[in-house]
Each structure stands twice: as structure tokens, then as C-alpha cells.
Image (cartoon, grey):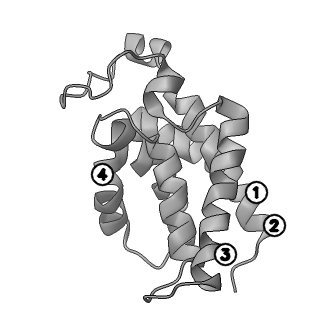
């Protein structure tokens, strides 16, 4: 199964958008899946249903940090190189979806949504393109990793 399919299936199982993405890459990460899932749990619904940065985008950034990030108080080139990587991933996502902001992609008027998630029914999946968006994020990240081997 492709990472795209894994990420989409995770979402259809009930994981939030960020968890769905990060768990699709768990096999290449040095982190227990329970910890990884908890780490990503706050970022669903555009960060706790605030409808800000899409959870799948936040998930891409988390994975990029684990695989390529720095772990100290660096400044200068080390930090700039990593931030350039994050901006590149964001740009690739924006090219496909026009935004990295949850509410903009979903056409929502609310800036901060109620904290209670909607039930995952067939109707929910029909009106929400989230599974496809998550799948696209997984493809973008997978391609990036293939083109930028981890050192």
C-alpha cells in the first residue's frame, strides 16, 4: 500500500488529518507510534479545530523535523536551511491546493470552529475533501524524501 493510501485509510479509520499523515511514515521514524500519534493529535482540524494550518501540512513539517531537523539552539545557516526545506514543502502543497490554511481549503467562514469534531459518517466524507488532501500531502512528502536522502 502506498503512503498516500495509508494516510487516507488512517483518516477513514478516524485519525485526525495530522495523525493520518505522520502515521503513514511511522516505519521510517525513530519514534513509537503511540507517541507519534499523541504528538500529532493537537494539529487536527487546522490545529485543534482552529482552522489554521492544515493538519496534514503540520504533519509534513513534523516528519521533516524528525528526519532533517536540527536539535540545538542553532542559528544562521543550519536553521535557514531547515526553514527553506519547510517553505519548499509548504509551497508544493500550496501549488496543489492554493493554500495551507484549513478553513480556506474547506471554504469555511469560521476562523475558530467549535472544539467538538463532527461524526465521521458517509455524509461527512462526501462533503470533506480531507482524505484527498491528506493523500496529496503524503505524496509530496514521500517524493521529497526520495529526492533528499536522509544523511
* Residue topped by disc 1: 143
Label 4 vs 3, first from the N-terminus: 4
Question: For residue 147, which numbered disc appears in the image?
Answer: 2
Question: For residue 64, which numbered disc appears in the image?
Answer: none
Contact, mark 4 vs mark 3 (Cβ under 8 Å): no
The residue drawn where x is 81% and y is 66% is 147
Question: Could you tell me residue 50's position as x and y percent?
Answer: 30, 35
SS label for mark 1? helix
Label 2, label 4: how far apart the Cα atoms are? 28 Å
Label 4, label 1: how far apart the Cα atoms are? 24 Å
Label 2, label 3: how far apart the Cα atoms are? 16 Å
Q: Nearer the viewer, mark 1 or mark 3?
A: 3
Contact, mark 1 vs mark 2 (Cβ under 8 Å): yes
Neighbour tally class for label 1: few under 14, some 14-19, many 20 plus, Cα within 10 Å: few
Label 4 vs 1, first from the N-terminus: 4
Question: For residue 81, which numbered disc appears in the image?
Answer: 3
Image quadrant containing the C terminus? bottom right
Q: Nearer the viewer, mark 2 or mark 3?
A: 3
* Residue topped by disc 4: 41
SS label for mark 4? helix
The residue drawn where x is 27% and y is 41% is 48
Amino acid at each position: 500500500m502506498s503512503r498516500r493510501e495509508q494516510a487516507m485509510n488512517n483518516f477513514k479509520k478516524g485519525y485526525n488529518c495530522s495523525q493520518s499523515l505522520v502515521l503513514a511514515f511511522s516505519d521510517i521514524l525513530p519514534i513509537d507510534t503511540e507517541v507519534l500519534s499523541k504528538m500529532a493529535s493537537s494539529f487536527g482540524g487546522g490545529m485543534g479545530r482552529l482552522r489554521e494550518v492544515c493538519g496534514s501540512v503540520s504533519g509534513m513539517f513534523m516528519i521533516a523535523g524528525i528526519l532533517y531537523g536540527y536539535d540545538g539552539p542553532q542559528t544562521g545557516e543550519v536553521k535557514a536551511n531547515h526553514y527553506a526545506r519547510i517553505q519548499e514543502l509548504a509551497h508544493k502543497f500550496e501549488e496543489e491546493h492554493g493554500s495551507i490554511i484549513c478553513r480556506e481549503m474547506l471554504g469555511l467562514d469560521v476562523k475558530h470552529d467549535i472544539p467538538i469534531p463532527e461524526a465521521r459518517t458517509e455524509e461527512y466524507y462526501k462533503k470533506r475533501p480531507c482524505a484527498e488532501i491528506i493523500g496529496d500531502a503524503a505524496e509530496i512528502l514521500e517524493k521529497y524524501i526520495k529526492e533528499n536522502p536522509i544523511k
